[in-house]
Image (spheres, helix red, strand yellow):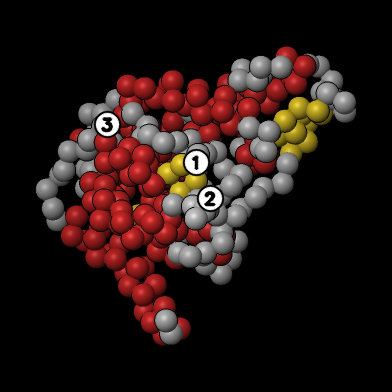
Amino acid sequence: MSLGVVRTKRGLARLAPILLSARLASAACTPVDHDHAAWTAILGRFVRGGEVAYGRLAREGAPMLASYLDGLSSACADDYARWGRAERLAFWINAYNAFTVRLVLDHYPIASIRKIGWLPGAAFRERFVPMPGLKGGIVSLDDIENGTLRADFREPRIHFALVCASRSCPVLRGEAYRAADLDRQLDDQARAFLADRTKNRFDPATNTLHLSSIFKWFRTDFEAGAGSLPAYVGRYLSDPRATAPGVRIEFLGYDWSLNDQAPPRE
């Protein structure tokens, strides 16, 4: 494929959300499936152990994903006002994760989501998510995470559910988040994330709790309700020594390599 074709393809990908947003803005309000069954079907088919089969999803599941995303983008403010808190929270978590997958597919194959754009973190600031009914236009992943989820909900467990397509992120859950099960799902994600020794671990020999950089970047979110970072993570750790007085906290480096599923061995 020539460089010109690649640039044309990516230019069309950037234009698509603008055209879709304009179309959706003039369309009737579409009810949202709060079971997010279509997203669960996609996750069940293309995600294994938190890793995404991006290549196979692009070949076999792109229409399924596009249909689900169109449904999210068609939500409108009048309906949103009638949703419960858990329905709103589940909607935005699923939207963040599903649109992140779409963004990766738009640029696939890539080694890392940080390869998208010229500056570090540009992918998260790129406005490509059409939300005409809820946000009046096109938003970014950063808008969803910081402008909506963190600003409106004050729920630190979102940081165990939002998946930035990288190996040091929490794993992409094999089912959609649903209002009826949301508390259980978020608690399960928190326990699983803190139990993953590649991301968080306690070293009794040095009395050091090594935590994901997520706890450094969003420390104020975790401390807001618990008073301290050890008090918060202690809710989900099984070893009481990890949060005893005098334990040192160090933050681990972050692996931004793509959470891509390795191709099956022959």
- Badge 2 crowding class, 10 Å Cα cut-off, few under 14, some 14 to 19, many 20 or more, is many
Residue lying at 65% horizontally and 20% vertically, measured from the top left: 237
Q: Please give the residue where the numbered disc 1 appears in the rendered image.
A: 50
Up the image or down, 84 lies above or below 134; here it is above
Question: In the rendered view, does 176 fall on the left or right side of 259?
Answer: left
Estimate the x, y position of residue 226 in percent, counting from the top left: 62, 20
Q: Given the image, on which type of amino acid does mark 2 rest?
A: Asn
Q: Is residue 89 visible?
A: yes
Estimate the x, y position of residue 234 in percent, counting from the top left: 66, 19
Q: Given the image, on which type of amino acid does mark 1 rest?
A: Gly
Residue lying at 87% horizontally and 26% vertically, measured from the top left: 205
Label 2: which secondary element: loop
Q: Given the image, on which type of amino acid does mark 3 rest?
A: Asp
Q: Please give the residue where the numbered disc 3 appears in the rendered image.
A: 35
Do callouts 1 and 2 mark residues in contact (Cβ within 8 Å)? Answer: yes
- Dot in front, 3 or 2: 2
Residue lying at 56% horizontally and 59% vertically, measured from the top left: 112
Label 1: which secondary element: loop
Q: Please give the residue where the numbered disc 2 appears in the rendered image.
A: 259
Image quadrant where residue 178 sits: top left
